[in-house]
Image: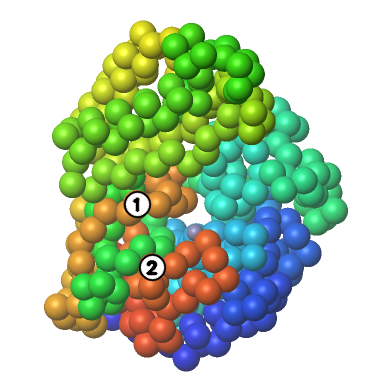
Amino acid sequence: MIRANTDRVLRDLYHLRSIGTYRTGVHRPTLSAEDMQTRHWLAEQLQAIGHETTIDGIANVYGRALGDGPVVLSGSHIESQNHAGWLDGALGVIYALEAARAVAEAGIPGGVDVIAFADEEGHFTEASFLGSESFVGDVTEEMMDRSVCRSGRGRLRDLLAQAGLAGRPRLAIEPDRYKAFFEAHIEQGQTLESEGLQIGVVTSIVAIWQYRITFEGAQNHAGTTKMAIRRDAGKALMQLWQRIEEEFPKIVGPDSVWTVGRVTLDPGGPSIIPGGAEMIFQFRDADQQVLDRLKARLFALVEEAGRGPCACTIEIMGESKPAIMYEAPQAALIEAAKTYAPGKYLVMPSGAGHDAQVIAPLVPSAMMFVPSIGGISHHWTENTSDEDIALGAEVFVDAIGRVLSAD
Ligand SMILES: [Zn+2]
Protein backbone atom coordinates (compact mmCIF):
# COMPACT_ATOMS: atom_id res chain seq x y z
CA MET A 1 0.00 0.00 0.00
CA ILE A 2 1.37 3.41 -0.95
CA ARG A 3 0.39 6.72 0.64
CA ALA A 4 0.27 10.23 -0.76
CA ASN A 5 2.23 12.96 0.99
CA THR A 6 -0.59 15.49 1.04
CA ASP A 7 1.56 18.38 2.31
CA ARG A 8 3.79 17.96 -0.72
CA VAL A 9 0.76 17.87 -3.05
CA LEU A 10 -0.57 21.15 -1.64
CA ARG A 11 2.88 22.76 -1.71
CA ASP A 12 3.33 21.87 -5.39
CA LEU A 13 -0.13 23.08 -6.37
CA TYR A 14 0.45 26.39 -4.58
CA HIS A 15 3.78 26.67 -6.37
CA LEU A 16 2.07 26.27 -9.76
CA ARG A 17 -0.48 28.88 -8.69
CA SER A 18 2.41 31.33 -8.21
CA ILE A 19 3.32 31.06 -11.91
CA GLY A 20 1.15 33.28 -14.10
CA THR A 21 -1.01 34.31 -11.15
CA TYR A 22 -4.20 36.16 -12.07
CA ARG A 23 -6.21 37.28 -9.01
CA THR A 24 -6.79 33.97 -7.17
CA GLY A 25 -6.37 31.94 -10.36
CA VAL A 26 -3.83 31.77 -13.16
CA HIS A 27 -3.34 32.87 -16.75
CA ARG A 28 -1.19 30.25 -18.45
CA PRO A 29 -2.34 29.70 -22.02
CA THR A 30 -0.55 26.92 -23.92
CA LEU A 31 3.03 27.83 -24.95
CA SER A 32 3.01 31.16 -23.08
CA ALA A 33 6.19 31.88 -21.13
CA GLU A 34 4.36 30.97 -17.91
CA ASP A 35 3.07 27.73 -19.37
CA MET A 36 6.57 26.74 -20.45
CA GLN A 37 7.91 27.65 -16.99
CA THR A 38 5.52 25.12 -15.41
CA ARG A 39 6.46 22.48 -17.99
CA HIS A 40 10.17 22.88 -17.24
CA TRP A 41 9.46 22.84 -13.51
CA LEU A 42 7.53 19.59 -13.87
CA ALA A 43 10.33 18.05 -15.95
CA GLU A 44 12.79 18.89 -13.14
CA GLN A 45 10.56 17.25 -10.54
CA LEU A 46 10.32 14.10 -12.65
CA GLN A 47 14.08 14.01 -13.21
CA ALA A 48 14.56 14.32 -9.46
CA ILE A 49 12.75 11.00 -8.91
CA GLY A 50 14.82 9.32 -11.61
CA HIS A 51 12.30 9.46 -14.46
CA GLU A 52 13.58 9.76 -18.02
CA THR A 53 12.01 13.06 -18.94
CA THR A 54 11.15 14.78 -22.22
CA ILE A 55 9.23 17.81 -23.42
CA ASP A 56 8.18 16.75 -26.90
CA GLY A 57 7.53 18.59 -30.17
CA ILE A 58 4.03 19.64 -29.14
CA ALA A 59 4.96 20.51 -25.51
CA ASN A 60 3.72 17.32 -23.87
CA VAL A 61 5.85 16.71 -20.78
CA TYR A 62 6.52 13.03 -20.20
CA GLY A 63 8.38 11.34 -17.40
CA ARG A 64 9.09 7.66 -17.89
CA ALA A 65 9.66 5.39 -14.91
CA LEU A 66 12.75 3.26 -15.28
CA GLY A 67 13.07 -0.22 -13.89
CA ASP A 68 11.01 -3.36 -14.11
CA GLY A 69 7.46 -4.20 -13.17
CA PRO A 70 3.99 -3.02 -14.04
CA VAL A 71 3.48 0.57 -15.14
CA VAL A 72 0.54 2.94 -14.88
CA LEU A 73 0.26 6.13 -16.93
CA SER A 74 -1.18 9.17 -15.18
CA GLY A 75 -1.59 12.87 -15.84
CA SER A 76 -3.74 15.68 -17.16
CA HIS A 77 -3.05 19.07 -18.74
CA ILE A 78 -0.98 21.83 -17.13
CA GLU A 79 -2.00 24.95 -19.13
CA SER A 80 -5.03 26.97 -18.08
CA GLN A 81 -7.88 28.66 -19.86
CA ASN A 82 -7.30 32.42 -20.23
CA HIS A 83 -7.55 34.15 -16.83
CA ALA A 84 -8.98 31.03 -15.24
CA GLY A 85 -8.65 28.67 -12.31
CA TRP A 86 -5.53 27.27 -10.65
CA LEU A 87 -6.68 23.65 -10.40
CA ASP A 88 -8.18 22.85 -13.81
CA GLY A 89 -5.55 20.46 -15.17
CA ALA A 90 -2.83 21.21 -12.62
CA LEU A 91 -4.54 19.08 -9.98
CA GLY A 92 -4.37 15.94 -12.13
CA VAL A 93 -0.73 16.57 -13.04
CA ILE A 94 0.35 17.03 -9.42
CA TYR A 95 -1.61 13.97 -8.26
CA ALA A 96 0.16 11.97 -10.97
CA LEU A 97 3.54 13.37 -9.88
CA GLU A 98 2.72 12.44 -6.29
CA ALA A 99 1.73 8.91 -7.31
CA ALA A 100 5.06 8.54 -9.16
CA ARG A 101 6.98 9.79 -6.13
CA ALA A 102 5.08 7.60 -3.69
CA VAL A 103 5.71 4.49 -5.78
CA ALA A 104 9.39 5.36 -6.25
CA GLU A 105 9.85 5.98 -2.51
CA ALA A 106 8.01 2.82 -1.49
CA GLY A 107 10.51 0.80 -3.51
CA ILE A 108 7.79 -1.49 -4.83
CA PRO A 109 8.15 -2.99 -8.30
CA GLY A 110 6.70 -0.98 -11.13
CA GLY A 111 6.20 2.69 -11.62
CA VAL A 112 4.06 5.56 -12.72
CA ASP A 113 4.77 7.36 -15.99
CA VAL A 114 3.61 10.96 -15.74
CA ILE A 115 2.28 13.08 -18.58
CA ALA A 116 1.24 16.73 -18.75
CA PHE A 117 -0.60 17.12 -22.04
CA ALA A 118 -0.45 20.26 -24.11
CA ASP A 119 -3.50 22.30 -24.94
CA GLU A 120 -6.39 20.30 -23.53
CA GLU A 121 -8.02 23.71 -23.19
CA GLY A 122 -8.13 24.19 -26.96
CA HIS A 123 -6.14 27.42 -27.31
CA PHE A 124 -5.11 26.20 -30.77
CA THR A 125 -7.18 25.17 -33.77
CA GLU A 126 -7.25 21.83 -35.64
CA ALA A 127 -7.84 19.55 -32.65
CA SER A 128 -9.91 19.57 -29.48
CA PHE A 129 -7.14 18.11 -27.35
CA LEU A 130 -3.97 18.76 -29.31
CA GLY A 131 -1.48 17.17 -26.90
CA SER A 132 -3.30 13.93 -26.11
CA GLU A 133 -4.49 13.55 -29.71
CA SER A 134 -0.87 13.91 -30.84
CA PHE A 135 0.17 11.30 -28.25
CA VAL A 136 -2.28 8.76 -29.74
CA GLY A 137 -1.23 9.59 -33.32
CA ASP A 138 -4.25 11.62 -34.43
CA VAL A 139 -2.40 14.89 -35.22
CA THR A 140 -0.63 15.11 -38.59
CA GLU A 141 2.21 17.48 -39.50
CA GLU A 142 -0.24 19.26 -41.83
CA MET A 143 -2.62 19.87 -38.93
CA MET A 144 0.29 21.36 -36.99
CA ASP A 145 1.13 23.58 -39.97
CA ARG A 146 -2.44 24.91 -40.10
CA SER A 147 -2.98 25.29 -36.36
CA VAL A 148 -3.23 28.86 -35.02
CA CYS A 149 -3.99 30.37 -31.62
CA ARG A 150 -7.69 31.19 -31.24
CA SER A 151 -6.83 34.36 -29.26
CA GLY A 152 -4.52 35.70 -31.95
CA ARG A 153 -1.10 34.86 -30.48
CA GLY A 154 -0.03 33.42 -33.83
CA ARG A 155 0.80 30.13 -35.51
CA LEU A 156 1.37 26.98 -33.47
CA ARG A 157 4.68 26.37 -35.29
CA ASP A 158 5.98 29.85 -34.45
CA LEU A 159 5.02 29.56 -30.79
CA LEU A 160 6.64 26.12 -30.56
CA ALA A 161 9.81 27.63 -32.04
CA GLN A 162 9.76 30.48 -29.51
CA ALA A 163 9.41 27.88 -26.76
CA GLY A 164 12.49 26.08 -28.09
CA LEU A 165 10.55 23.01 -29.22
CA ALA A 166 10.73 23.35 -33.01
CA GLY A 167 11.77 20.15 -34.75
CA ARG A 168 11.55 17.97 -31.66
CA PRO A 169 9.92 14.61 -32.27
CA ARG A 170 6.46 14.05 -30.88
CA LEU A 171 6.00 11.20 -28.42
CA ALA A 172 3.71 8.30 -29.25
CA ILE A 173 1.86 6.26 -26.69
CA GLU A 174 2.97 2.67 -26.08
CA PRO A 175 -0.39 1.16 -25.16
CA ASP A 176 1.03 -2.23 -24.20
CA ARG A 177 3.29 -0.63 -21.60
CA TYR A 178 0.40 0.36 -19.36
CA LYS A 179 -1.92 -1.48 -17.02
CA ALA A 180 -4.09 1.63 -16.83
CA PHE A 181 -4.36 5.39 -17.33
CA PHE A 182 -5.57 7.50 -14.41
CA GLU A 183 -6.61 11.14 -14.61
CA ALA A 184 -7.80 13.27 -11.70
CA HIS A 185 -9.64 16.54 -12.26
CA ILE A 186 -11.82 19.05 -10.50
CA GLU A 187 -15.48 18.23 -11.09
CA GLN A 188 -16.31 21.62 -12.70
CA GLY A 189 -19.92 21.08 -11.65
CA GLN A 190 -21.94 21.13 -8.46
CA THR A 191 -23.00 17.52 -8.04
CA LEU A 192 -20.44 16.52 -5.39
CA GLU A 193 -20.71 19.73 -3.37
CA SER A 194 -24.50 19.79 -3.38
CA GLU A 195 -24.64 16.23 -2.07
CA GLY A 196 -21.93 16.83 0.55
CA LEU A 197 -19.55 14.35 -1.13
CA GLN A 198 -15.77 14.51 -1.63
CA ILE A 199 -14.86 12.05 -4.39
CA GLY A 200 -16.37 11.32 -7.79
CA VAL A 201 -15.50 8.10 -9.62
CA VAL A 202 -16.21 8.67 -13.29
CA THR A 203 -18.13 6.07 -15.26
CA SER A 204 -18.10 7.75 -18.66
CA ILE A 205 -17.17 10.97 -20.41
CA VAL A 206 -19.89 12.56 -22.47
CA ALA A 207 -19.76 13.01 -26.21
CA ILE A 208 -20.32 16.54 -27.53
CA TRP A 209 -22.32 16.79 -30.76
CA GLN A 210 -22.29 20.27 -32.24
CA TYR A 211 -24.06 21.77 -35.24
CA ARG A 212 -24.23 24.99 -37.22
CA ILE A 213 -27.82 25.74 -38.25
CA THR A 214 -28.30 28.44 -40.88
CA PHE A 215 -31.44 30.25 -41.99
CA GLU A 216 -31.81 32.15 -45.23
CA GLY A 217 -34.66 34.64 -45.59
CA ALA A 218 -34.91 38.07 -47.19
CA GLN A 219 -33.22 41.17 -45.86
CA ASN A 220 -35.53 44.18 -45.97
CA HIS A 221 -36.60 47.48 -44.37
CA ALA A 222 -38.02 47.13 -40.85
CA GLY A 223 -40.46 50.00 -41.36
CA THR A 224 -41.88 49.51 -44.82
CA THR A 225 -42.09 45.72 -45.20
CA LYS A 226 -45.53 44.32 -44.30
CA MET A 227 -45.49 41.53 -41.73
CA ALA A 228 -47.31 39.10 -44.03
CA ILE A 229 -44.63 39.07 -46.68
CA ARG A 230 -41.56 39.05 -44.48
CA ARG A 231 -39.04 36.24 -44.60
CA ASP A 232 -37.37 36.98 -41.26
CA ALA A 233 -34.43 34.62 -40.67
CA GLY A 234 -34.10 35.70 -37.03
CA LYS A 235 -37.70 34.84 -36.26
CA ALA A 236 -37.35 31.46 -37.98
CA LEU A 237 -34.27 30.72 -35.87
CA MET A 238 -36.09 31.63 -32.68
CA GLN A 239 -39.00 29.37 -33.63
CA LEU A 240 -36.65 26.42 -34.18
CA TRP A 241 -34.99 27.10 -30.83
CA GLN A 242 -38.44 27.05 -29.23
CA ARG A 243 -39.30 23.74 -30.96
CA ILE A 244 -36.06 22.20 -29.66
CA GLU A 245 -36.96 23.27 -26.12
CA GLU A 246 -40.42 21.66 -26.56
CA GLU A 247 -39.26 18.41 -28.12
CA PHE A 248 -35.92 17.58 -26.46
CA PRO A 249 -37.27 17.12 -22.90
CA LYS A 250 -39.51 14.32 -24.24
CA ILE A 251 -36.62 12.19 -25.54
CA VAL A 252 -33.46 13.08 -23.56
CA GLY A 253 -31.68 10.81 -21.06
CA PRO A 254 -31.40 11.73 -17.36
CA ASP A 255 -27.98 13.38 -17.86
CA SER A 256 -28.49 15.00 -21.28
CA VAL A 257 -27.71 18.71 -21.61
CA TRP A 258 -28.20 20.94 -24.65
CA THR A 259 -27.17 24.52 -25.40
CA VAL A 260 -27.56 27.23 -28.00
CA GLY A 261 -24.18 28.83 -27.39
CA ARG A 262 -24.18 31.42 -30.14
CA VAL A 263 -26.71 33.22 -32.29
CA THR A 264 -25.83 35.67 -35.05
CA LEU A 265 -28.20 37.73 -37.17
CA ASP A 266 -27.16 39.06 -40.54
CA PRO A 267 -26.69 41.96 -40.99
CA GLY A 268 -27.68 42.64 -37.37
CA GLY A 269 -28.99 46.20 -37.83
CA PRO A 270 -31.73 47.57 -35.55
CA SER A 271 -33.91 48.61 -38.51
CA ILE A 272 -33.18 45.72 -40.84
CA ILE A 273 -35.15 42.47 -41.06
CA PRO A 274 -32.44 39.80 -40.81
CA GLY A 275 -31.90 38.07 -44.12
CA GLY A 276 -29.63 35.49 -42.55
CA ALA A 277 -29.34 33.86 -39.14
CA GLU A 278 -27.08 31.23 -37.64
CA MET A 279 -27.06 29.30 -34.40
CA ILE A 280 -24.47 26.99 -32.93
CA PHE A 281 -26.24 24.21 -31.10
CA GLN A 282 -24.73 21.39 -29.07
CA PHE A 283 -25.91 18.53 -26.91
CA ARG A 284 -23.99 16.16 -24.66
CA ASP A 285 -24.63 12.67 -23.40
CA ALA A 286 -22.63 9.52 -22.70
CA ASP A 287 -25.24 7.17 -24.16
CA GLN A 288 -24.88 6.47 -27.88
CA GLN A 289 -28.57 5.65 -28.26
CA VAL A 290 -29.59 8.93 -26.68
CA LEU A 291 -27.16 10.82 -28.92
CA ASP A 292 -28.57 9.15 -32.04
CA ARG A 293 -32.12 9.87 -30.92
CA LEU A 294 -31.40 13.55 -30.25
CA LYS A 295 -29.67 13.96 -33.59
CA ALA A 296 -32.58 12.38 -35.48
CA ARG A 297 -35.06 14.69 -33.75
CA LEU A 298 -32.88 17.75 -34.36
CA PHE A 299 -32.63 16.99 -38.08
CA ALA A 300 -36.41 16.45 -38.26
CA LEU A 301 -36.98 19.81 -36.56
CA VAL A 302 -34.61 21.49 -39.02
CA GLU A 303 -36.56 19.98 -41.89
CA GLU A 304 -39.79 21.20 -40.31
CA ALA A 305 -38.29 24.70 -39.94
CA GLY A 306 -37.31 24.67 -43.62
CA ARG A 307 -40.97 24.32 -44.59
CA GLY A 308 -41.54 27.87 -43.30
CA PRO A 309 -40.72 31.08 -45.20
CA CYS A 310 -36.94 30.69 -44.73
CA ALA A 311 -34.59 27.99 -45.94
CA CYS A 312 -32.92 26.08 -43.10
CA THR A 313 -29.77 23.98 -43.34
CA ILE A 314 -27.70 22.11 -40.78
CA GLU A 315 -23.99 21.33 -40.83
CA ILE A 316 -22.20 18.93 -38.49
CA MET A 317 -19.34 20.67 -36.64
CA GLY A 318 -18.34 17.77 -34.43
CA GLU A 319 -19.68 14.43 -33.18
CA SER A 320 -17.22 12.99 -30.66
CA LYS A 321 -17.58 9.52 -29.21
CA PRO A 322 -18.61 8.95 -25.61
CA ALA A 323 -15.82 7.31 -23.64
CA ILE A 324 -16.69 4.57 -21.19
CA MET A 325 -14.26 4.19 -18.29
CA TYR A 326 -12.85 0.73 -17.61
CA GLU A 327 -14.00 -1.50 -14.85
CA ALA A 328 -10.70 -2.53 -13.24
CA PRO A 329 -9.13 0.91 -12.62
CA GLN A 330 -12.59 2.28 -11.78
CA ALA A 331 -13.01 -0.48 -9.18
CA ALA A 332 -9.60 0.45 -7.71
CA LEU A 333 -10.79 4.05 -7.28
CA ILE A 334 -13.98 2.83 -5.60
CA GLU A 335 -12.02 0.61 -3.20
CA ALA A 336 -9.67 3.50 -2.39
CA ALA A 337 -12.65 5.82 -1.87
CA LYS A 338 -14.22 3.28 0.50
CA THR A 339 -10.99 3.34 2.52
CA TYR A 340 -10.38 7.09 2.70
CA ALA A 341 -13.83 8.58 2.09
CA PRO A 342 -16.39 6.01 3.24
CA GLY A 343 -19.89 7.15 2.34
CA LYS A 344 -18.48 10.31 0.75
CA TYR A 345 -18.02 9.21 -2.85
CA LEU A 346 -20.25 9.04 -5.88
CA VAL A 347 -20.03 7.03 -9.09
CA MET A 348 -20.95 9.54 -11.80
CA PRO A 349 -20.59 10.55 -15.47
CA SER A 350 -18.41 13.48 -16.58
CA GLY A 351 -20.24 16.28 -18.37
CA ALA A 352 -16.99 17.89 -19.52
CA GLY A 353 -14.44 16.57 -21.99
CA HIS A 354 -11.02 15.37 -20.77
CA ASP A 355 -7.77 13.91 -22.11
CA ALA A 356 -8.84 10.55 -20.63
CA GLN A 357 -11.43 10.19 -23.40
CA VAL A 358 -8.61 10.30 -25.96
CA ILE A 359 -6.52 7.70 -24.09
CA ALA A 360 -9.45 5.40 -23.20
CA PRO A 361 -9.66 3.58 -26.57
CA LEU A 362 -6.00 2.49 -26.19
CA VAL A 363 -5.39 1.99 -22.46
CA PRO A 364 -7.90 1.01 -19.74
CA SER A 365 -8.70 4.43 -18.32
CA ALA A 366 -10.29 5.81 -15.19
CA MET A 367 -11.01 9.29 -13.87
CA MET A 368 -11.57 10.74 -10.44
CA PHE A 369 -13.14 14.08 -9.45
CA VAL A 370 -12.78 16.30 -6.43
CA PRO A 371 -15.49 18.91 -5.65
CA SER A 372 -15.49 22.38 -7.18
CA ILE A 373 -16.64 25.05 -4.74
CA GLY A 374 -19.90 26.46 -6.10
CA GLY A 375 -19.40 24.30 -9.20
CA ILE A 376 -17.32 27.13 -10.71
CA SER A 377 -14.72 26.46 -13.38
CA HIS A 378 -13.11 28.23 -16.34
CA HIS A 379 -13.08 31.32 -14.14
CA TRP A 380 -10.38 32.66 -11.79
CA THR A 381 -12.58 32.10 -8.72
CA GLU A 382 -12.51 28.31 -9.31
CA ASN A 383 -11.46 26.57 -6.10
CA THR A 384 -11.44 23.38 -4.04
CA SER A 385 -10.79 23.21 -0.29
CA ASP A 386 -7.33 22.09 0.85
CA GLU A 387 -9.05 19.30 2.77
CA ASP A 388 -10.71 17.97 -0.39
CA ILE A 389 -7.48 18.31 -2.39
CA ALA A 390 -5.62 16.30 0.25
CA LEU A 391 -8.30 13.61 0.46
CA GLY A 392 -8.42 13.33 -3.33
CA ALA A 393 -4.65 12.75 -3.40
CA GLU A 394 -4.97 9.96 -0.81
CA VAL A 395 -7.66 8.17 -2.81
CA PHE A 396 -5.95 8.67 -6.17
CA VAL A 397 -2.52 7.45 -5.06
CA ASP A 398 -4.01 4.51 -3.19
CA ALA A 399 -5.99 3.44 -6.30
CA ILE A 400 -2.85 3.49 -8.45
CA GLY A 401 -1.05 1.42 -5.80
CA ARG A 402 -3.88 -1.12 -5.93
CA VAL A 403 -3.64 -1.46 -9.73
CA LEU A 404 0.16 -1.82 -9.63
CA SER A 405 -0.01 -4.54 -6.99
CA ALA A 406 -2.95 -6.45 -8.54
CA ASP A 407 -2.16 -9.68 -10.40
ZN1 LIG B 1 -9.25 20.64 -17.52
Which residue is most to the bottom? 7
> Disc 1 or disc 2, which is closer to the eye?
2
Please state the total of marks drawn on the protein image: 2
**Label 1 belongs to which residue?**
351
Question: Label 2 amino acid?
Answer: Gly
Query: Residue 194: image x %, image y %?
Result: 25, 72
Which residue is depicted at the point 68% across and 56% down? 30
- The image quadrant of residue 387 is bottom left
Separation (CA) of disc 1 from disc 2: 12 Å
Is any part of residue 130 visible from this angle? Answer: yes
Indicate the secondary structure of the residue bearing disc 1.
Answer: loop
On screen, residue 356 above or below 321? below
Are discs 1 and 2 less than 8 Å apart at CB? no
Which residue is depicted at the point 60% across and 59% down? 81
**Label 2 belongs to which residue?**
375
Which residue is depicted at the point 58% across and 29% down? 265
Question: Label 1 amino acid?
Answer: Gly
Q: Which label was assigned to residue 9?
A: none
Residue labelled 2 has its Cβ within 8 Å of some atom of ligand 1:
no
Quadrant for the N terminus in the image: bottom left
Between residue 139 and residue 14, name the one nearer to us. Answer: 14
Quadrant for the C terminus in the image: bottom left
Indicate the secondary structure of the residue bearing disc 2.
Answer: helix
On screen, residue 356 above or below 276? below
Is any part of residue 97 visible from this angle? Answer: no
